[in-house]
Image: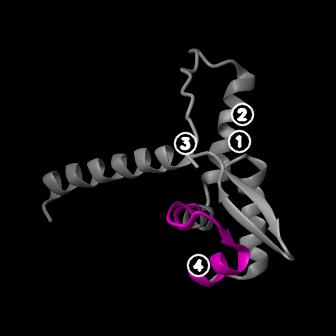
Amino acid sequence: MAIASKKKKVTSPLNPQAAELIARRFRALADPTRLRILDHLRNHEEASVGEITDTLGASQQNVSKHLAALHAEGFVARRKRGTSSLYRIADPGVHEICDGVTAGIETQLTELEAVFGS
């Protein structure tokens, strides 16, 4: 199922409420475990807590805590299947954010290598 992305340009300057909402979403992404969960879900349509736990080598409690934070910010969606919860990406824009940051890091590394050699 394809999800249409509606890109709306944010007005500048940001008002304080918009800045707080944006910062809250960035805080939800500011954890390596959460980024690894999102990366796992990028490659799987849906995954259970157990599957994510096995892939990350983390505890079920830790993965559940991070999934709850990602769910609260709307990055992932959850559905029940029996006694299990299945998670999927709810906001595909999260991958655009991560890809943009990754591209910036790659550019920075290339520039540092040019200055300091490899």
- Which residue is drawn at the image coordinates 57% and 28% (left, top)? 6
User: Which marked residue is nearer to the observer: mark 3 or mark 2?
Assistant: 3
Place residue 37 in its image quadrant: bottom right
Instruction: Say whether disc 3 or disc 1 marks the residue closer to the N-terminus.
Output: 1
Q: Please state if 87 lies on the left or on the right of 112 as rendered.
A: right
Q: Which residue is mark 3?
A: 93
SS label for mark 1: helix
In the picture of the structure, the residue carrying the numbered disc 4 is 56
Residue 31 pos. (x, y %):
61, 60
Question: For mark 1, does the 10 Å Cα neighbourhood hold few (<14), some (14 to 19), or many (20 or more) residues?
Answer: few
At x 27%, y 48%, the residue is: 107
In magenta segment, residue 101: no
Residue at the front extreme of this rendering: 1
Q: Position of residue 4 (x, y in %)?
A: 56, 36
Depth check, mark 4 against mark 3: the one in front is 3
The tag earlier along the polypeptide, 4 or 3, is: 4
Please give the residue where the numbered disc 1 appears in the rendered image: 24
Circles 2 and 1 in contact, beta carbons < 8 Å = yes
Secondary structure at badge 3 equals: helix
| Nearer the observer, 20 or 71 | 71
Q: Nearer the viewer, mark 3 or mark 1?
A: 3
- Measuring from the top left, give residue 83's x and y in whole percent: 86, 77
Task: Single out the residue that lies furthest toward the right.
Answer: 83
Q: CA distance from mark 4 to mark 3?
A: 23 Å
